[in-house]
Image (cartoon, rainbow, N blue to C red):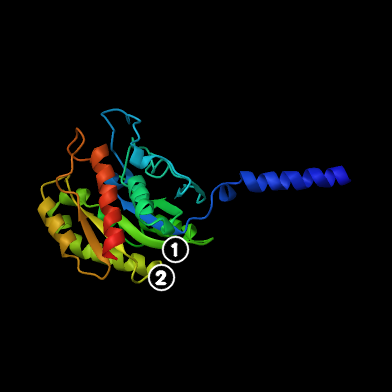
Amino acid sequence: MKIFHLVTVLLLAYARIASPESCHHQPKSIFILSGQSNMSGRGGVGRVKWDGVVPPECEPSPSILRLGPNLTWEEAKEPLHADIDLNKTLGIGPGMSFAHSVLAQEPSLGPIGLVPCAVGGTNITEWARGGLLYSDMVRRAKAAVKHGGTIRAILWYQGESDTIIEEDALRYKHRLKKFIEEVRCDLKLPTLPFIQVGLATALGPYIDIVRAAQFGVKLPNVKIVDAKGLPLEWDHVHLNTPAEVKLGKMLAHAFLHDF
């Protein structure tokens, strides 16, 4: 019986060590990454596949975790949106360089937890409250803080799909404002920082209307980081790897210095 008891104790100890929840510590500062493809990451993606190049600013770190599709924390690595932005060829996004930049400047905010939620090719109407994307984002955000940690900000890069139809572009400001207000309400975080990215590219002709809408949203704790002018991939729609790295650093600067 003593041997059986000892074996049982050892097996339980091993299970605790090997479980996803215990392999990595709970993050202290949590960030929601949402929007469409330039947030989920297409840096380094050619016409067929990702080149697999991970710059130093995006290397894995024990202090940077991601909430996986099964709602458990794991060490983050590129592509950060693997198994989240489904059926896409994924590459480098801004999330990892953002986290590294925040840790480099404010180590006390670590460990950092990233919650990838972005899905490529999505219109803002698909992010409306009650829809699948919105509900999944809120579900993942709530799961992220279930065992501790604080949601520090939402990083949002979306709008290229709303430049195709003029009516969508004209209604973007109202829809974005409503989206921000409803997310804050459903997460019970009325002053949650919201950092959006000003569009660098578009899928249609109405980019100027959408950009004006982005800059025109006047809500407390809403900031904008402008991606215009950052270098692009071959398709002239997606940011390339150096651009995604720089954008992550710009987002970190905005979070650390504007709130």
> Please, what secondary structure does the residue beneath circle 2 have?
loop
Mark 2 or mark 1: whose residue is earlier in sequence? 1
Which mark's residue is nearer the viewer, 2 or 1? 1
- The label on residue 241 is none
Amino acid type at mark 2:
Lys
Percent from the top left, x then y, of residue 36? 29, 48
Look at the image and tell me whether residue 62 can be seen.
Answer: yes
Q: Residues within 10 Å of mark 2 (few under 14, many from 20)?
A: few
Q: Residues within 10 Å of mark 1 (few under 14, many from 20)?
A: some
The residue at the point 50 percent across, 51 percent down is: 71
Contact, mark 2 vs mark 1 (Cβ under 8 Å)? no
Q: Gap between marks 2 and 1, in whole Å?
A: 12 Å
Find disc 1 in the rendering and name its residue.
Answer: 150
Amino acid type at mark 1:
Thr
Look at the image and tell me whether residue 171 can be seen.
Answer: no
Percent from the top left, x then y, of residue 169? 15, 56
List the single residue furthest toward the right: 1
Relative to residue 215, is residue 73 depicted above or below? above
Left or right: 170 in relation to 143: left
Find disc 2 in the rendering and name its residue.
Answer: 188
Left or right: 201 in relation to 96: left
Percent from the top left, x then y, of residue 35? 30, 52
> Please, what secondary structure does the residue beneath circle 1 have?
strand
The residue at the point 43 percent across, 53 percent down is: 112
The residue at the point 25 percent across, 52 percent down is: 250
Relative to residue 236, is residue 174 depicted above or below? below
**Quadrant of the rendered image containing residue 154:** bottom left
